[in-house]
Amino acid sequence: MTLSWSARIVATAVLLGAFALATRARGADASKGIEELEQDKAHQVLVAEPLAKAKAALERARRFRAAGDEPRAKAADALATTWVEAARETVKAQETEAHAEAEVARVADAGRLVERERALVEEAMMQNGRLRAQLDGLEREAKGEPARAAALTDAGARPLASGVDAGAPRPTDAGAGKPTGATK
């Protein structure tokens, strides 16, 4: 199916009109975006530079249109829209960074809490061991075993042989096979 020349011209005019409206809509979007970002007082310092550049691009687009240079006006509108999008992305990035910093602080607090809880558990386990040793000592004492031998056994040391002075130096395990005081 072939279109006549008049149908082609009408179709081209409609497409160009739609493109011009879309381009003007981009300029209007940029203007609307600038207004929205100017209302955001919390991020005004952060977006000041991109908004200034977007306003300058919109002003250039207006001057190009006044001069009848629609292609450059469209390019200036597109530039303004890009600067508005950059400002929005900057705000999003700053908010994401603030959220990440808050999460890092929360995780650090949780880490400190876990470390404190671990220390408390270790302390409770040591206290449990001491109480168990005391209980074992009391049970041995009740059975008539000497408390000193029980305490040394609980501590992992060899019990002293009867008649050995507890304050005297003991031979080390390394020299266990040699008699003490003998020289060759």
Image (spheres, rainbow, N blue to C red):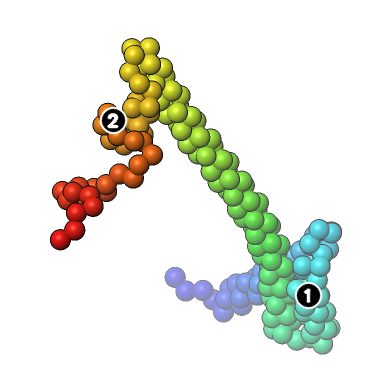
Let me know if residue 6 appears in the view. no
Residue matched to label 1: 49
Residue occupying image coordinates x 46% and y 33%: 126
Marks 1,2: beta carbons within 8 A: no
**Rendered view: 64 above or below 15:** below
On the image, the x and y values in percent for residue 139 come to: 37, 15
On the image, the x and y values in percent for residue 131 come to: 45, 24
Numbered badge on residue 29: none
Which corner quadrant holds the C terminus?
bottom left
Numbered disc 1: secondary structure? helix
Nearer the camera: disc 1 or disc 2: 2
In this view of the protein, which residue sits in the foreground, 174 or 133? 174
In this view of the protein, which residue sits in the foreground, 27 or 134? 134
Q: Is residue 60 left or right of residue 79?
A: right
Residue occupying image coordinates x 71% and y 73%: 83
Residue type beneath disc 2: Gly
**10 Å crowding of disc 1: few (<14), some (14-19), many (20+):** few
The quadrant in which residue 46 appears is bottom right
On the image, the x and y values in percent for residue 167 come to: 38, 39
In this view of the protein, which residue sits in the foreground, 81 or 10? 81
Which corner quadrant holds the N terminus?
bottom left
Residue type beneath disc 1: Glu
On the image, the x and y values in percent for residue 73 come to: 74, 81
Numbered disc 2: secondary structure? loop
In this view of the protein, which residue sits in the foreground, 44 or 51? 44
Residue occupying image coordinates x 27% and y 48%: 172
1 or 2: tag closer to the N-terminus: 1
Residue matched to label 2: 163
